[in-house]
Image (cartoon, coloured by chain):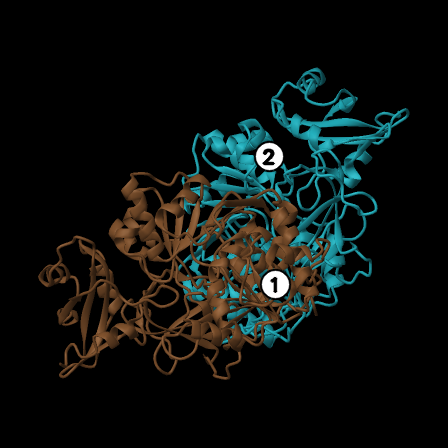
Chain colours: A brown, B cyan
Amino acid sequence: MKGLMQNQPLLISSLLKFADRYHADTEIVSRTVEGPIHRYGYGEAAQRTRKLADALRRKGVGLGDRVATLAWNTFRHFELEHGVTGLGSVWHAINPRLSPAQISYIVNHAADKVLFLDASFLPLVETLAPGLPTLDAVVLMVARADMPKTSTLPSLLCYEEFIDSGQEEFEWPVFDELSASSLFYTSGTTGNPKGVLYSHRSDVLHCLSITGAYSMGFTARDTILPMTPMFHANGAWGFTHAAPMVGAKLVLPGPKMDGASVAELIDREEVTVTAGVPTHYANLLRHYEATGTQPPALRRIVVAGSAPAPSLIEGFERMGVSVHHIWGMTETSPSGTTSQPSRFAVTLDVDHQRERKASQGYPIYGIDVKIADEDGREKERDGNSGGRFMVRGPWVISGYFRDDKNVLQDGWFDTGDLAVMSGDNNIRLTDRAKDVIKSGGEWISSIDIENIVAGCPGVSEAAVIGIPHPKWEERPLLVVVPRPGADLSWNALVDFLEGKIAKWWMPDDVVFTESLSYGATGKIQKTELRRRYATHYTP
Amino acid sequence: MKGLMQNQPLLISSLLKFADRYHADTEIVSRTVEGPIHRYGYGEAAQRTRKLADALRRKGVGLGDRVATLAWNTFRHFELEHGVTGLGSVWHAINPRLSPAQISYIVNHAADKVLFLDASFLPLVETLAPGLPTLDAVVLMVARADMPKTSTLPSLLCYEEFIDSGQEEFEWPVFDELSASSLFYTSGTTGNPKGVLYSHRSDVLHCLSITGAYSMGFTARDTILPMTPMFHANGAWGFTHAAPMVGAKLVLPGPKMDGASVAELIDREEVTVTAGVPTHYANLLRHYEATGTQPPALRRIVVAGSAPAPSLIEGFERMGVSVHHIWGMTETSPSGTTSQPSRFAVTLDVDHQRERKASQGYPIYGIDVKIADEDGREKERDGNSGGRFMVRGPWVISGYFRDDKNVLQDGWFDTGDLAVMSGDNNIRLTDRAKDVIKSGGEWISSIDIENIVAGCPGVSEAAVIGIPHPKWEERPLLVVVPRPGADLSWNALVDFLEGKIAKWWMPDDVVFTESLSYGATGKIQKTELRRRYATHYTP
C-alpha cells in the first residue's frame, strides 16, 4: 500500500525556483574574471538561468548530454551549474589545474558537447581544441564588449549573446530524479582521472543534509563565501546548491584567491561562513594578522580537504570564529561527517576539544561508516584499532563513469583512507592507505606526525613519507618547508617531537625544501615526494 | 542517463538504525503511565524495537497492515512508532480525545489488525471492542506485573511478553520508499474524521527538513521534549523521527501534562527544546512564574497549532528562551513554514519583530505556498491581499485514505486557512475560511482581534465569532474566559481594543464564560461556539 503524499521528483531546478519565489532580492555577489564586482538577486539569476537553459535546448543539448565548464566561482558559473542540470543535461566542471593532457582526456571521455570557459582559459582551449572532436560549440563567459578580436577557434560564441537566444518563459522540465546531474573527475595520483556522476536525487538529499543544524547549519541570514572552487567536489561542496535552498546570500570570489582579495569580500559583504582547504585559511589568517583587522561578521569556517593545523584553529578562534573541520571526498558528494561537538565532546577539557576539532568528527545520518579489516569485518571502536575507512549511503558513489570496475565491497565504498574510531564514534584519519609507512611490520601514521610538526615554530608546511630502508622495509622521512626567515634545525624538530610520538615513529632524517609537490586540488602529492627522495635511505 | 550513486530507499527504519549505531548510549527518558521514570539508550531501544517488529511479523502482521495505538508519549509508544513502520506495516496513532463513536469509526475505517493501548484506555477499549471486528489482537502496553487480574477482553496480551516473542536478530526489511508509513485522522468539526496517510519517503524528507538550521535546528547536543502528543500530526510533529536522526536525547512526558510535572522533566533532564501548542506553554509559564524558577537549559520552544499570544512570547523571552512559532497541519506532515527571522526581519524594531514572531513565518524549501483567489490565481504579496492559503510539496497530502474526493486544485492543496503574505514573503493567517466574519460584505479577521484581546489584563482566553445579524449579515461577538479572580468589564475590553482595530471590527457585544469549546486536538471549536450563541444578535 502506497502513502498518499505528493510524490514530486527531487530535482536541482527546485532549488533556484525556491530562491526565485521567496528570496528574489537576496544577492549573489561575484568578483568577475574581468575585475569588477557584479551583483544581482536570485530573481534575476533565475531569469537568466532559464534563458541559458532554453538557449542550450535550442542548440540541441538534451537530457543526459554533457556540458563542460572551465571557470572560476562567478555568477555565470552559478547560472551554468543550475541551468545545465535544470535542463536535465549533465554539468561537467573541469578542474583547470589538471594537466592539458588530462583535460583533453576527460573532455573526450565525457564526450562533452559544449564547453563554456572563462577568458583566462582561452589560450589553453585554443591549443587543445583540435583534439576535442566531440565539442559542438565553445562559449566564452564574457559580455560582447569583452570578446577577443580574433581567436583560432572558428566559431567562438559569446556567453551574453548565447543566453539572449533563449526565452525567459522557459519552464524547467520534470524528469526522473535518478537522472545524472553533474560529473566531476577525481585526479588520482596514478592513472587517468575517474568520473563521479551525481544524480539529482543524491544532490538534493546531500543538500538537505548539509543545511542541517548538525552540519553546515545554513539559514537565510547567512552570507556564504565558498573559496573552494566550483570545479571541486559537487560545485563547491554543495554550497552553491545550499545557498538558494535556504535563501542565503552568496559571495563568489572569482579568480583572485589571495588573502587580501578574499578578505576584502568577507569584510565588505559581511560574510558569515566560508568553505575552503587549510591553504585558503592560512592565507586569510596571515592577511588578518598582518593588517591587525578582523572579519566583522564571520561566525564559522568550514575546513575540508585535509585537517586544519592547531595553529590555524587557534588563530581563527582568537578572532571569535569557530572552526568546523569535516571529512568528505568527491565520491561522497562530499559531505560525510559533522564537526559539531558531540554530547560527550563538550564535556572534554579545552585541549581535548581542540584535538577533536582537528579530527574528522562523527557520522551524520545518511552516511554509514565502518573501520574494517581487509575482509570488510568491522574493527573495534576503541580509538586505537586502525583499518580501512569505508562508507555507504544515498550520496555515496556506486561506480565511476564509463568504468566497469566494481568499487563496492558488499555495498561499502573504500575511501582509501585509514582511520580509527573512538568509543563515542569520533573518526580520526591516520593515513591514506597508499601513504601509510610500514616499518618493521608495524604501521606509522604520517598524518599524526605531520599534525604535530605543523605546530612547531618556524614550520610552514611538512610532510612525512615512507622511504625504502634496508633494514626496516620503510622508515619515515620528514620533509619540511620552513617559514621565510625561520632558523630551523633537525635538532629543534627532534626536540619538538620528543615525547609527543612513540620513539620508533621518530623520522630517521629531515630534509628542508622550498616547496612540496601538489596535485590539481591543492593536496600534497606524496607519490611525487616519495619519488623525489626514493633513495634517501639506500644511497 | 542515470547518475552513479547508491540509490537506497528512504525508509524510517534508517533513523533508529543510525541512532543505534552512533548514539547507542544517548538516552530516551519517559515518564511512564504507571508513574516511575524509565530511561534507556537508543541501543536498547533499537534492540527492543527489532524484537517488537519480529513479534508483529510472527503474529501475521505484514506490509501495509494497520497497527493502531491509543497511547501517551512514552518509550513503548516510541518503539511502536519505529517498529510498526520499520516492518513496513502502517502505524495508526489514534487520538484518544476523539469521541468513542469516532474512535470506533476510524478503527473500522482503517481496518486495524492489532491495537496497542496504555492502561488508562482499557475501560474505553473494553466498551468498544465488540464493535471492532477487524482487530486480531489487543495488547496492553505494560509489564506482566501491571496486567489487570481480569478484563472483558478475552485475549488481552501483555506488551512485554509480546515483544519477548520476537528475536532481536531481526533485520529491517527493505521495500519501496513510497509505501505507506503511518495514518493520522484529522478531526474535522463536521463529518467523519479523515485519514492522512504518510509515506516513508515523505517522512524522511520531512525529517531532513525539520532538522535544518532554518527549521527546528536539532543537533546531537539537544534534549528534546515533545509535549505535543505522538497521536497528533506525524508522531509529535516528526520530533520522534528527528531525535534519532540527529542523535538527540529524547524526553517523553507520558500522561502528566500539568505545568509542574512537565517543568520537573525540563529542569531535571536539562531539556533544550520543546514542542507544544499555546495551552501547553501557558501552563508551563504559569508554573515558572508561580515558583519563581527558570528552566536551566531550555533555549527555544516550538509553538504550533495556533499562534502564541504576545504575553506568552514575552514571558518566555524574559527567561532567555526564544519562541519559534511555525505553521503546519496534519496534511503537511506538518512542517510548512519557518519562524527563523529573515534577513529583512532582523532589521525591524523590537515591536515589529515581536509581531513577526506571532505570525506564521516564511516558506521553507519543499513547501511551495500561494495566497489565491477562488480560481487559484495567486494574489499580490503586499501584506494586505487576503486569500486562500494553498500549498504543495513532497510532504503535502495528495488525497485522504479510502476517500475518492479530489483534494488538489492544479496540484495545490487548500489548507482551509485564509492568509496574507507580505512583500518579503511573511505569511499571516487571518482566519480559518469557515470562521471568517462577513460583515456588510467585508471580511473581519477573528484571529487579529483575538490576538489583541489575549494581551488584555485579566483575560485567560478569548474567541471572536461571527453571529447572524439582521442588518450586517454577521457581526463579531467576543467570548471571553476571565482569569480566576479578575474583574473584567465590557468597557475595559472596549477601551483596550480602541484604536488597535478598525472601528467597524469592534465586537458588538461580549459574553463572559467559564470555558470555550475544544476539539480533540485542543483547538477552540468555533462551530460549537457559533451554535451556542447563534441567536445572540437576533433574539
- Find the residue positioned furthest to the left: A491
Which of these two is toward me, A278 or B383?
A278
Please give the residue where the numbered disc 1 appears in the rendered image: A84
Q: For the residue marked with disc 2, what is the amino acid?
A: Arg
Residue at image location 43% in from the left, 78% down from the top: A192
Q: For the residue marked with disc 1, what is the amino acid?
A: Val
Which of these two is toward me, B402 or A276?
A276
Residue at image location 66% in from the left, 42% down from the top: B522
Residue B144 appears in the picture as rendered: no
Please give the residue where the numbered disc 2 appears in the rendered image: B356
User: Is residue B62 toward the left or the right of residue A93 in the image?
Assistant: right
Residue at image location 39% in from the left, 56% down from the top: A276
Which of these two is toward me, B391 or B93?
B391
Residue at image location 26% in from the left, 49% down from the top: A350
- Which x, y percent locates residue B360? 63, 40
Q: Determine whether label 1 and label 2 are within 8 Å by CB.
A: no
The residues bearing labels 1 and 2 have C-alpha atoms spaced at a distance of: 38 Å
- Which x, y percent locates residue A494? 11, 63
Q: Secondary structure at mark 1?
A: helix
Marks 1 and 2 share the same chain: no
- Find the residue positioned furthest to the right: B470
Q: Is residue B450 above or below residue A447?
A: above
Q: Is residue B54 above or below residue A25?
A: below
